[in-house]
Amino acid sequence: MKNYITLSDIDNLENLISEARSLKSKNTVPDLGKGKTLGMLFFNSSLRTRLSTEKAAKLLGMEVMTMNVDKDGWTLEFEDGAVMNSDKAEHIKEAAAVLSQYCDIIAVRAFPGLKNKEKDESEQVLNSFKKYASVPVINLESATGHPLQALTDAITIQELKKKDKPKIVLSWAPHPKALPQSVPNSFTEMMQKLDVEFVITNPEGYDLNPEIRKETRVEHDQEKAFENADFIYVKNWSSYENYGQVLNVEKNWTVNQKKLEPSNNAKVMHCLPVRRNMVIADDVLDSENSIVIHQANNRTFAAQAVLKQLLKDED
Ligand code: CP
């Protein structure tokens, strides 16, 4: 593996999931990362991604440097050939080249603007780091994907499934703000790679990018979608068709205990942070059905497996 920017960077998914589960049981692999540095750059807020990836790197013996680029760094110019006569003080060409001398792996979080679909889909920030850095680049959640989260989710499902081919439902839920499609995109792509029955349920107007959905069944009736579900992954996303918009939805899509009744006593997942009683009700989050804390714990081992693979393939 040369980079971890999209799920297509994974050479062997089964092996990567096994590696993460093995690392979880061992908890440490000393020396592989000794003398190596992970540099993490955040253009947006984070709790889990930042701390679990830092922990993962330290469990491998790496040093970690973290920067809130949006607050502490020079404002970066990403356009080639730009005349830098306004607010942008440093070009990505120099920034990525310099960082590549300080770091053995660079990890970047950069959310979409949700105003311009084409610009967001170009993944300008991640792809510019990939282009101008001379070390591997990891996606800590970008405009269109969150592959570390998706790997975590696959590990969690493999650990907790009770049948060979579980039914997994990705359910849209309400949120007061316009959120990216990154998490549901990567979750969808991951589920398409696993041997599961996968259904997406969302209101009309919230269908994900058809190039990502592909042949995945979309059910606009949430109750019907939840029938016999073994896992329900709850997440809000803004509209793809009316790009970045929050649409008026008549029905209540908040996931509560009543909604779980047609399911197979489903385990409920969410990437977190979650808005209680908006996205998922207290009676689910505080119940045995919720596995969100277990899921968040697996962020460390997903990151550790990816870092270990990148370090091994670098040698
Ligand atoms: N799930 C996730 O990426 O959490 P953070 O935004 O807190 O990193």
Image (cartoon, rainbow, N blue to C red):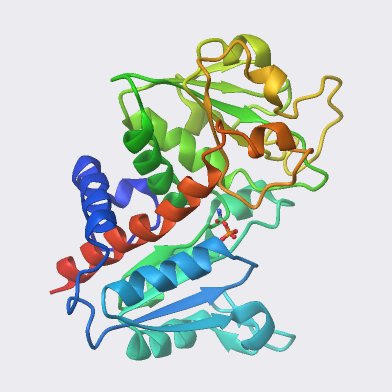
User: Where residue 37 appears, x then y in whole percent?
Assistant: 33, 84
Looking at the image, the residue that sits furthest to the left is: 315
Q: Is residue 241 above or below residue 100?
A: above
Residue 283 relative to residue 73: left or right: right
Residue 252 visible somewhere in the drawing: yes
Residue closest to the eye, 74 or 234: 234
User: Could you tell me which residue is drawn at 43 percent across and 50 percent down?
Assistant: 147
User: Could you tell me which residue is drawn at 47 percent across and 76 percent down?
Assistant: 40
Q: Quadrant of ligand 1?
A: bottom right
Residue closest to the eye, 195 or 212: 195
Residue 206 relative to residue 289: left or right: right
Residue closest to the eye, 246 or 285: 285
User: Could you tell me which residue is drawn at 53 percent across and 19 percent down?
Assistant: 265
Snapshot quadrant of residue 5: bottom left
User: Could you tell me which residue is drawn at 61 percent across and 87 percent down?
Assistant: 73
User: Where residue 223 appears, x then y in whole percent?
Assistant: 66, 12
Residue 114 relative to residue 252: left or right: left
Residue closest to the eye, 153 or 145: 153
